[in-house]
Image: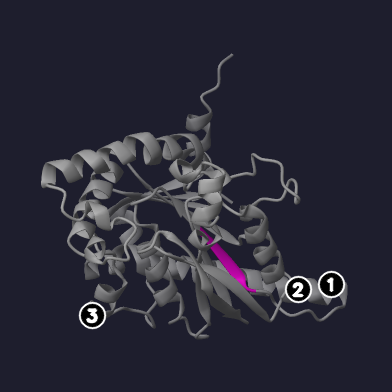
Amino acid sequence: MTVNLTMKSTEAYSHFTRTEWSSLTKPKHANLSTQEIGLLQGIDQIISTDEVSDIYLPLSHMLYVQMTHSMKLHQEMNLFLERKTKKVPFVIGIAGSVSVGKSTTARLIQALISQWPSKPKVDLVTTDGFLLPNATLTERQLMKRKGFPESYDIESLIEFLTDLKSGAPYMEVPMYSHLTYDRLHHEKQIINQPDVVIVEGINVLQVNKKKTNIPMIFVSDFFDYSIYVDADESNIKQWYIERFKLLQNTAFQDPSSYFHQHRNLSTDEAIAFATDVWNTVNKVNLEKNIKPTKYRADLILKKGTGHRVTDIKIKKT
């Protein structure tokens, strides 16, 4: 008998429409001004105050419930084990396709969590910093596979998460420049005793498919809660093309930009180039490596036109 695993997977989730979700409890202590939202949104996204109020405030409150439960469990385990151990950071993973709006989602969640009653220290780490340097990718003939699992230094990412969950007081994380399209060799992000860490990237829910020095340990093993940002592929493709056209008139104009050579493409040429990159790289990665991880997430945010969230699915407990 053939079993539709995708259909079975959806049954493991409780489904909320936008209207149902927006009616849930919102924290009275948290909100973002129009100016703050403007600083957090992406170059190709306009996030309305209604979007924050209807979607992200209830999401923030739900994450607060999750973290409060985690803290209570930690205290009870200390009592049971008769040991006094320090609570390690609460780690949230955010996954999804290129151009789906993961980074904006992560920044909004970071800003709202920082307004919780306890005023936690929240750090945001992107896995872009764990991409192998361009020189290494070129040497291994992987530049056209950038973003695929084999283009990341997964061992270093897992080592960082292991240190994080071990209570390491001080860590340095590699950083990435979307301008030069390469890892920054002389700049590091300092992680110093955070209460919450958000780890955002297309690969955070994937399982290791290659042989590593740390077998059978996955990035998601270190998450206390995980979110997948979802959208129909046709929408994501359109957002990718529109962002490329916007970057032509902004970042690509900088001589240090990796894509500086594409700054003067005509509209038709830009659309053709971006479409080809989508079809040969991002679409393949989405379908082969990213989308199959969707049902590993605890919560799925489904976006529609204009990056507006239309549906939310939460894994049943």
Task: Please name the residue shown 35% across and 64% down the image.
Answer: 179
Q: Which of marks 3 and 2 is in front?
A: 3
Question: Does residue 272 sit above or below 117 in this rendering?
Answer: above
Q: Name the residue under label 1.
A: 80
The amino acid sitting under disc 2 is Glu
Is 92 part of what is drawn in magenta?
A: yes
Q: Give the range drawn in magenta.
A: 89-93
Q: Mark 2 points at which residue?
A: 76
Q: Position of residue 107 (x, y in %)?
A: 39, 70
Q: Where is residue 277 in the image (x, y as percent from the top left)?
A: 32, 40
Q: Position of residue 28 (x, y in %)?
A: 37, 80
The amino acid sitting under disc 1 is Phe
Which quadrant is the N terminus positioned in? top right
Taking 152 as reference, is 105 left or right?
Answer: left
The image quadrant of residue 69 is bottom right
The residue closer to the viewer here, 10 or 133, is 133
* Helix, strand or loop under label 2: helix
N-terminal of the pair, mark 1 or mark 3, is 3
Say which mark, if any, is on residue 175: none
Q: Can residue 194 be seen in this view?
A: no
Q: Distance between the residues labelled 1 and 3?
A: 47 Å
* Helix, strand or loop under label 3: helix
Q: Distance between the residues labelled 2 and 1?
A: 6 Å
Q: Which residue lies furthest to the top in this view?
A: 1
Task: Please name the residue shown 26% across and 58% down the image.
Answer: 260
Taking 151 as reference, is 249 left or right?
Answer: left
Q: Name the residue under label 3.
A: 35
Taking 286 as reference, is 192 left or right?
Answer: right
Q: Do the residues labelled 2 and 1 touch (CB within 8 Å)?
A: yes
The residue closer to the viewer here, 67 or 288, is 288
Magenta segment, prevailing SS (helix, strand or loop): strand
